[in-house]
Image: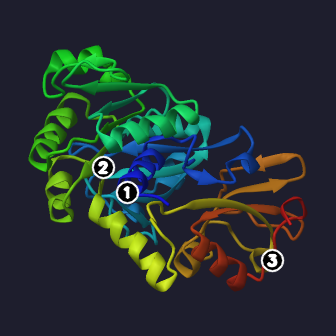
Amino acid sequence: MFTPSHVLAAALAARASTRISPPADGMHLLGSQVGLAEFRVRAGSPLAGKRLGDLQLRVRYGVTVIGQWVCGAFNTANGPDTCIEAGAILVIVGAQANLEKVERLALPIRRSGPIVLAGYGEVGRKFVEMLNDAGEMVIVIDRDVAPGIDIAGNVLEHRTMERARMREASAVVLALSNDSEGVFATAVVRDYAPQVPLIVRANRAQNIPRLYQAGADFALSVGQVAGQILAYHLRGEQAVAVEHRLKFIRVVAGLLAGGHPWRDQVRERTGAVVVAVERGDRVLVEFDDAFMVRPDDTLFICGTSDSLERYLREFEATLADSQC
């Protein structure tokens, strides 16, 4: 039996820790040649407000935009008309060297370093317990000195944030008991550490839009998870759907043989994208206009579960032997 507070702590932990919830399943299939990275698009970035078709990131940098996180929702990039929003977190796949080129356009989000938690109530304590079990380092801030608290102080003060090494964090989680204080703290933390993923707990669901306006990347309320638990018990629906999962699969060429990985309307038809082609002992991630998929090639496809299923149907592809 789990209380809503425990489930909320688990949802916050899944957002904060890549050990608990990796950004994409199946990344190991790509080896070390291809990576997935997240970039924050600042308001002044050359990417903000632009369409993917105009930016030509594949042609210029050899990277593929999978989608973007906007106000806690993951929006898959569905084609050249997809507009990149200011403040969004882009999910991009490409060769490691090519991903580094994108750093000139947007802020890379570091996923190493401690996780900073402000608020050590019931939700905060369960959150820390879960992250400790996962082997994460957590720095806990609370107003009062007590066992389990690393820094006693006000999270709104720069001195407290400096002591907590907030700018070096892989994520900051605000689990404050008062929503008004949470909104104010969100704005202060976002201004102090603009590049760090910011995850905020809310008591009331109607306050979540205010948290996003203040700069939260993800906001979750007790009411959200309580409603999902109730839906699970009453209708058997999946409880606490807090993650829009991405996945990589290896497939045979299928009907894409003779076509081009990026020019056969793959994304538009399925929502999934071809991110690499395995040919012999090489993994190719950049394709010129003359490139053609061979029948014996193995393709690396990225997408959500639904888009991957559509890809398998649309191109009559099957999983490669090593993944069956």
Q: Amino acid at mark 2?
A: Asp
Q: Position of residue 106 (x, y in %)?
A: 36, 40
Nearer the observer, 304 or 203: 203
| Residue at disc 1, secondary structure | strand
Name the residue carrying label 3: 254
Say if 47 sits above or below 146 in the image. Answer: below
Q: Position of residue 80 (x, y in %)?
A: 43, 69
Label 1 – label 2 distance at C-alpha? 8 Å
Instruction: Give amino acid for label 3.
Output: Gly
Q: Residue at x 82, y 62 (%)?
A: 298
- Amino acid identity at mark 1: Trp
Contact between marks 1 and 3 (CB within 8 A): the answer is no
Could you tell me residue 313's position as x and y percent? 71, 84
Q: Residue at x 27, y 49 (%)?
A: 201
Q: Is residue 30 left or right of residue 47?
A: right
* Marks 2,3: beta carbons within 8 A: no
Disc 3 packing (10 Å; few <14; some 14–19; many ≥20):
many
- Determine which of the numbered discs, if any, sits on residue 217 in the image: 2
Distance (Cα) linking label 1 and label 3: 31 Å
Q: Residues within 10 Å of mark 2 (few under 14, many from 20)?
A: many
The mark that comes first in sequence, 2 or 3, is: 2
Between 306 and 51, the residue placed more toward the observer is 306
Which residue has dot 1 on it? 69
Q: Is residue 225 left or right of residue 131?
A: left
* Residue at 86% over, 66% down: 324
